[in-house]
Image: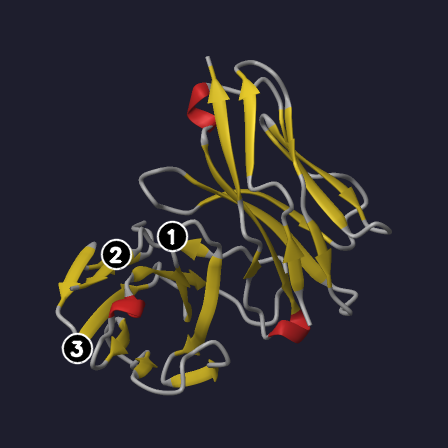
Amino acid sequence: NAGVMQNPRHLVRRRGQEARLRCSPMKGHSHVYWYRQLPEEGLKFMVYLQKENIIDESGMPKERFSAEFPKEGPSILRIQQVVRGDSAAYFCASSPADRVAHEKLFFGSGTQLSVL
Amino acid sequence: AQKITQTQPGMFVQEKEAVTLDCTYDTSDPSYGLFWYKQPSSGEMIFLIYQGSYDQQNATEGRYSLNFQKARKSANLVISASQLGDSAMYFCAMRDLQGAQKLVFGQGTRLTINP
């Protein structure tokens, strides 16, 4: 049973380019979360999605950032016109259930985005 | 609103000693879960232990135990007989139903085990 798969592991972009980060949840999981981690800081929540639905995007910047989790395929975090401040590790997590406080999140290995 | 506080930016411990990593939390939801994750230098997030707000006993997982003091809103992680491989960042996190199930993380504690 494969874990949460994120790719690419490392992504380098120049300022102004677009970054697309992919996340395939664990088999049987229909809930996906995206987190961002700056160096020496904790993970900051960005967005929570179910298949074809954005449930909570309270942590997403208002501009340039978007996320989707289509019926088929991985979840995508898209950052348009990247700036140096977008450089961070982006983690995806998945869980199987809704409204269950005790359900732990399984994390992927993260994508390290570097903006030159 | 949910909040997690880890007041120890760094800890240094001798190998084989026990270590306690502090975590306090704040929530108005009576039903919540508390989690600890380990992040080694390789970057992945490794789940260590979970404590539910209604659990009567403190959680234990091998060398990890959680000292849950509900009235004080604290959920400290205790690692017994520390090993060199325990050197990592440790994050306390909380999830409640009011928070739309998202996990809220503390700032983390960097633990260094000295030989």
Above-or-below relation of A30 to A94? below
Amino acid on which the number 1 mark rests in the picture: Pro
x then y, percent, for residue B86: 47, 27
- Vertical position of residue B21 compared to residue A58: above or below: above
Label 3 neighbour load within 10 Å: few <14, some 14-19, many 20+: some
First in sequence: mark 1 vs mark 3: 3
Image location of residue A46, percent across then percent down? 44, 72
What amino acid type is highlighted by mark number 2? Gln
Which label number is shown at residue A18? 3
Quarter of the figure with residue B98: bottom right
| Residue with the mark numbered 2 | A112
Mark nearest the camera among 2 and 1 is 1
Three-letter code, disc 3:
Glu
What distance separates the C-alpha of mark 2 from that of mark 1?
Answer: 11 Å
Q: Which of the two discs, 1 and 3, sits closer to the camera?
A: 1
Q: Chain of mark 1?
A: A
- Which class describes the residues within 10 Å of circle 1: few (<14), some (14-19), or many (20+)? few
Q: Residue at x 42, y 47 (%)?
A: B45
Q: Is disc 2 surrounded by few (<14), some (14 to 19) or many (20+) residues within 10 Å? A: many
Q: Is residue B108 left or right of residue B94?
A: left
> For the point 13% across and 70% down, which residue is it?
A14
Q: CA distance from mark 2 to mark 3?
A: 14 Å
On screen, residue A22 versus residue A108, left or right, reads: left
Please provide percent x and percent y for residue B67. Answer: 74, 38
Q: Which residue is mark 1?
A: A39
Pointers 2 and 1 in contact (CB under 8 A)? no
Nearest to N terminus: mark 2 or mark 1: 1
The answer to whether residue B65 is left or right of residue A97 is right
Count of marks, rendered view: 3
Find numbered disc 2 in the image and state the secondary structure of the residue it sits on.
strand
- The reply to whether label 2 and label 1 mark residues of one chain is yes
